[in-house]
Image: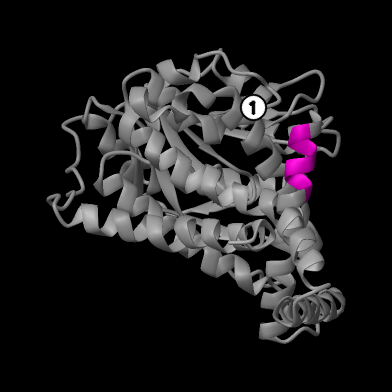
Amino acid sequence: MHPLVALVGVPPLLAGYAYLVYPAILRAWRRRRPPVEAPPDPPEWPSISFVVPMYNEARAAASLLESLLAMDYPADRRQVLVVSDASSDGTDDVVRRYADRGVELLRLATRGGKSAAENAAGRVVRGEIVIHTDATVRLRPDAAKALVRWFQDPTIGVASGRDISVANIAEAATEGEAGYVGYEMWVRQLETRLGTIVGASGCLYAVRRELLLTSFPEELSRDFASCMIAHEHGFRAVSVEDAICRVPRSTSLAAEYRRKVRTMARGLRTLWYKRALLDPFRHGRFAFFLLSHKLARWLVFLSLPVAALALSLLALRSTAALALLALGAGGLLVAGVGVLLERRRRAPGLLRLAAFAAAACVAGVEAWLKALSGHRQAAWEPTRRSV
């Protein structure tokens, strides 16, 4: 096989493995395992702490706090802690209005990011189980109990919620996001059946308090690393199907693009920080899951520019390569039209899907460039969603 042909084939092979072959392996493996039953209620509900990092979330804060205070969980066993990342829009004032209902505010003097807020929370949380969530999501009233039930198993250190992407009522939504979120939750359920997941949902996940006390670099992604930290301490991580977290879709393709660049770049740096866990000889199944679920997906984007260059060189002497290159260019043109129409809220479903796919690919390439260049995001900028 010509080396250029091999390079062109790398992205589809990686994508095929990560998105089709790997889940098929998990499904085949799962058939030999008994079903995992949800645990019953514990004899006594343990104490919990909700931790909500916020940066300039004055519009969303009250609604979220009302929903947390209305959760189906014993009030005397619950702490609600908001960590304000040096907010400047009145977020702190909104949170202080809930002080008489038990809501606590921890303000950081300077902006440090989400992981910095979670690190700071570790000094003041009192719950045996710490539940992390975001300001712009909404939890089902029984979500806390659904997560906490699993910690009766002493081998479990992290329980991740199930994200459900919901329509953004105020703005046009990104069609591709909903399908991908559902797919991701399905893969996590397969991994849970086989013992552990390798990445928790940043929108909703719970950890044992001793794992939160583990020091962690502020510029990395603690929610992604939570399962790796748990594994290092001898615990498993699971995805809890009944712990529903409703996540409004991004208000625009541009916002979704920025989110993907930010989260993937931080994820790559976090994986490099924990790269020892990729050794299958020392970490067995966990390393296999981590390589297949995370690294293989991300390598698709790293290989795209090389494949595009190889295809361009092949097109100079091959009609088939030229046709494939023209097809790719046509796809990009369609995606570009979708981007332009999406900005005007006029894009039909198929064009929005094409625009989403193209934006995801470009975002993945940019994330690799940022990660490889050592770029550090100066400050945390949470995804803005209409709620």
Q: Is residue 39 above or below residue 80?
A: below
- Among the 4 quarters of the image, the one containing residue 372: top right
Q: Is residue 134 left or right of residue 211?
A: right
Q: Is residue 260 left or right of residue 86?
A: left
Q: Is residue 119 above or below residue 295?
A: above
The residue positioned 39% from the left and 51% from the top of the image is 188
Residue 143 rendering spot, x and y as whole percentages: 39, 48
- Residue 110 part of the magenta segment: no
| Secondary structure character of the magenta stretch overall | helix
Residue 14 rendering spot, x and y as whole percentages: 53, 56
First to last magenta residue range: 366-372
Visible residue check, residue 198: no
State the quadrant of the C terminus: bottom right
- Look at mark 1 in the image and give the residue it sits on: 115
Q: Secondary structure at mark 1?
A: helix
- Among the 4 quarters of the image, the one containing residue 120: top right
Name the amino acid type tagged 1.
Ser
Q: Is residue 333 left or right of residue 281?
A: right
